[in-house]
Every structure is written in C-alpha cells, then in structure tokens.
Amino acid sequence: MGAVSGTGTLVAEAGDVNWLRADVALAAAARRQAGQLARSICLDEERVARVELCVTEMATNLLKHAEDGAIALRVVRDRDRAGVECLAVDNGPGIDDVRGALRDGMSAAGSLGIGLGAIARLADAFGVHSVRGRGTAVQARFWTGDAPPDPGPVDVGGLTRPIGGEQVCGDTWAVRTATGDDPDVLLLLLCDGLGHGPLAARAADRAREAFRDSAHSRPAAVLEDVHRALRHTRGAAVAVARVDAAARRVELTGVGNTTALVAFDDRRTGLLSLPGIVGSQLPRLRTFEAAYPPGAALIMHSDGLSDRWAPADFPGLVTHGPALIAAQVLSQAAVRRDDAGIVVATHRRG
C-alpha cells in the first residue's frame, strides 16, 4: 500500500473475501480459487503448489470433522507487500490437544492428509485456535518476497462476510498510520453501512475513502470527515480508534451500533459508541479511552456479530495474530442473517 493524501500511510484495509461453505465440492473449489489468488500476486509455481496443498488439507479436515464450517480465501496487503491468506473456521468438537495435532505425522482422526504440522511448516505465517465443544480456526499466509513483513509494535487485521445471498458486504474496515510512518500510532476504522447490498457497500466504500484521505490524526476529527463524505449516502455506523503503543492507550470515537473493546488476559474493557447515524444524524462527539498494555487486543466489530461474547469464552485467543482472532470471533459470534465486519489490533509483547 502506498502513501495516502492525508498525513498517514495506509497499512491494511478490507478487500474481497471468497467465502466457501463446507460441502462435497469444497476441496476442489478451495484449491482452484487459492491457486488463482496465488498466481494473481505472482507467487512462483512451487509456492502456488504449497498454497493449494495447504488449503486442500484445511478443506478435507472440515468435511471430515466439523459439524459446519467454511474457508475464507483472500489477498492481504501490508503496506507494499502482498500475500494469500487461507482461513478455515468451523463449529465442531474442537481439537483436544493442539500441540499434539501439530506434531509430525499427525493428521486429525488418522486421516491421510498432510496434517496441521506440515501446514505450519509450509506457510509463511500460521496459527490455530480451538475451543473444545465449540470449534477451531486455522490460518495460513503465504507472502511475496523472501520473508514475512514485520508488523511493528502493533499488528492489525480484519475480516468481512456478506449477508447470505449477497455478493458485496456493507461492512468494511481500514488501518493507517496516524502521522507519517510512525508504527507506534495507528488509526483504525470500522464501518457498517446501513442495510445490506450495493447501497450499504457504497456507503462503506465512501467511508473508507474519507478515512484514507483525512488529514487528521484524532478519532473525532477523522469521524467528522467521514460524516461529511457520507451525507449523500444512506449513512452508516462508524467507529474510529487511535492506538498508541508507546503510550499504551486507546482512544475511540464511535457513532451507531458498533462494539469496541480491549481484551487482555481474558478480560474486556468496553469503549462506548454514541447513538446516531454518520452521514445524517451526528451527535456531539465524545472520545473514550482505555489502557492498551503489551499483550492486549483492540477488537472492533459491527452488529453483525453479537456483543455478548467474552474473551474468557476463548481462552488464549488474544495471544494469536489479529486475523486469527477476527476469524474465530466472527465464526463463533456472527449473526447468521447479517453482514459482519471485524477489525483487530494486537499490541505485540516486546
């Protein structure tokens, strides 16, 4: 990602996500789409084969062991780097012994697949989180270049999923530096366009553009820029957060039905969002703050996910990367008949 016209640099943002539900054709469809994505970012054929092998194993495990599940495939970007990400999520029995499942030669239930350990070795970045009796999330990323990018003190990621029957999602997210290229201070946007379908997606796209272009570095001022950009749309619920790793603080200004919390050691600190509609009815803005120590995760999501979930429901989840956190929370807390969007910023321990 290149420089934006405001004061910051775009770090990451929502893009197209290919969601594939678990059915008899899952393995073939996932392998084909993953290969296409890998070639689209110019991975060489040896690495394309790795991507295809890993996603085939993910699909096989879903079909054999999960009660319900899906694979999400997408191109991810970190500033000027691109990669293919494969996420498998399920509602199922979970994995009793994750460490054991990662040992060489271990594939779930004795299947002939390559196993999670081999996926971990083949991928540039790998993660797995499982809750017994609830389900499992698995992540594998394959980057261009010789090594994965260094995210700096704060790692970010997110995920969106459209309402059933729609091709576009009315929820979106984006992350940029607050000023220049300082990786210690980032701004995050979470937007839920009102309603569903193309008109909601149009509002979300406009919000993301205004966020990128804003010359401001404080959440309330950025939100006012987004409000002006959405005046001729149906409007949206929007939250803008500023995370400062050095100061160990989060600031958030939100309007509409969004959820934001800082999770740390299986506890949560909520950050309020005010009633209103960005683009139509903007209240007098307030900014709320919370501590953001190393090891904490800021999690922001739309009302496409229930706000009743708690970090204690997912022991150890916040120690993982942001994309895996987003995938597991979305899988377990999403409202089935609604757009869903989530963005996560993890404060990495030194």
Image (cartoon, rainbow, N blue to C red):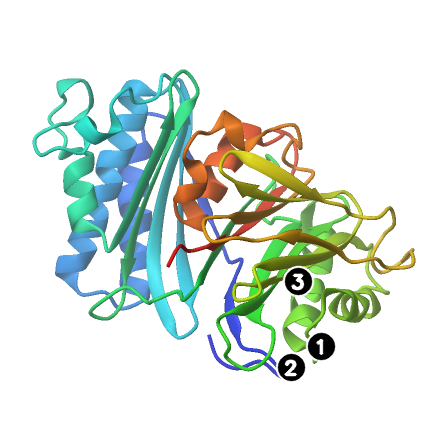
Q: Position of residue 113 (x, y in %)?
A: 14, 30
Foreground: 275 or 203? 275
Q: Amino acid at mark 2?
A: Gly
Residue 139, visible in the rendered structure? yes
Q: Nearer the viewer, mark 1 or mark 3?
A: 1
Residue appearing at x 32%, y 31% in the figure: 25
The Cα–Cα distance between marks 1 and 3, rounded to whole angstroms, is 19 Å
Q: Amino acid at mark 1?
A: His
Can you say which quadrant of the picture contains the C terminus? Answer: bottom left
Q: Which residue is mark 1?
A: 216
Foreground: 333 or 321? 321
**CB atoms of marks 1 and 2 within 8 Å:** yes
Residue appearing at x 30%, y 23% in the figure: 63
Residue appearing at x 16%, y 38% in the figure: 117
Could you tell which of marks 1 and 3 lies nearer the N-terminus?
3
Residue appearing at x 83%, y 69% in the figure: 228
Helix or strand or loop: what does disc 3 sit on? helix
Asked whether, in this view, residue 115 is left or right of residue 198, the answer is left
The crowding category of the residue bearing disc 2, from other C-alpha atoms within 10 Å (few below 14, some 14 to 19, many at least 20), is many
Q: Position of residue 340 (x, y in %)?
A: 61, 41
Residue 167's label in the rendered image is: none
Residue 260, picture quadrant = top right
Residue 6's label in the rendered image is: 2
Q: Which residue is mark 3?
A: 205
Q: Is residue 246 above or below residue 134?
A: below
The crowding category of the residue bearing disc 3, from other C-alpha atoms within 10 Å (few below 14, some 14 to 19, many at least 20), is many
Could you tell which of marks 2 and 3 lies nearer the N-terminus?
2
Q: Position of residue 282 (x, y in %)?
A: 89, 58
Asked whether, in this view, residue 2 is left or right of residue 132, the answer is right
The Cα–Cα distance between marks 2 and 3, rounded to whole angstroms, is 17 Å
Q: Amino acid at mark 3?
A: Asp
